[in-house]
Amino acid sequence: DSRFPNRDPHFLFDYGNPDLDGVSVKEITDHKWNARTISFLVQWADGTSSWEPLFKCSPLLALDVYLSLKGVSHPRELPKLRRSPRNA
């Protein structure tokens, strides 16, 4: 905007992609169970990905979207599938 050229729009509006450790979250693409705990594969805006525990992902809009796409309302309802070693 020419009236406010140095204004950061993220300062005024929450776009729903909070960050973990300062990097914006793009989406959550997978989950895995380890005994009774669950982790999520987070795709970061910088192109990297990492497995993150539920407590870090629970405030993210990306988790709500992922759960909706899977047809569940809570992470505990996600299937506990066996994964091949390459996906572990």
Image (cartoon, rainbow, N blue to C red):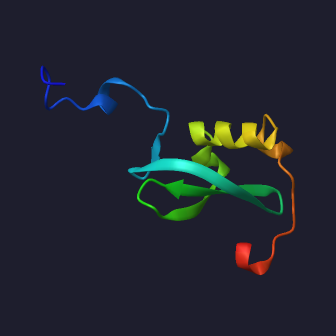
User: Is 64 left, or right, of 25 in this rendering?
Assistant: right
The answer to whether residue 44 is above or below residue 87 is above
User: Is 7 left, or right, of 86 in this rendering?
Assistant: left
Q: Position of residue 32 (x, y in %)?
A: 75, 61
Residue at image coords 85%, 43%? 77
Which residue is most to the top? 3
The answer to whether residue 50 is above or below residue 15 is below
Residue at image coords 87%, 68%? 82
The answer to whether residue 71 is above or below residue 47 is above
Which residue is most to the bottom? 85
Residue 39 makes an appearance in the image: no
Q: Which is nearer the eye, 6 or 52?
A: 6
Residue 31 makes an appearance in the image: yes
Q: Position of residue 59 (x, y in %)?
A: 58, 37
User: How many marks overall?
Assistant: 0
Q: Position of residue 5 (x, y in %)?
A: 13, 29
* Quarter in which the C terminus is drawn: bottom right
Residue at image coords 48%, 64%? 48
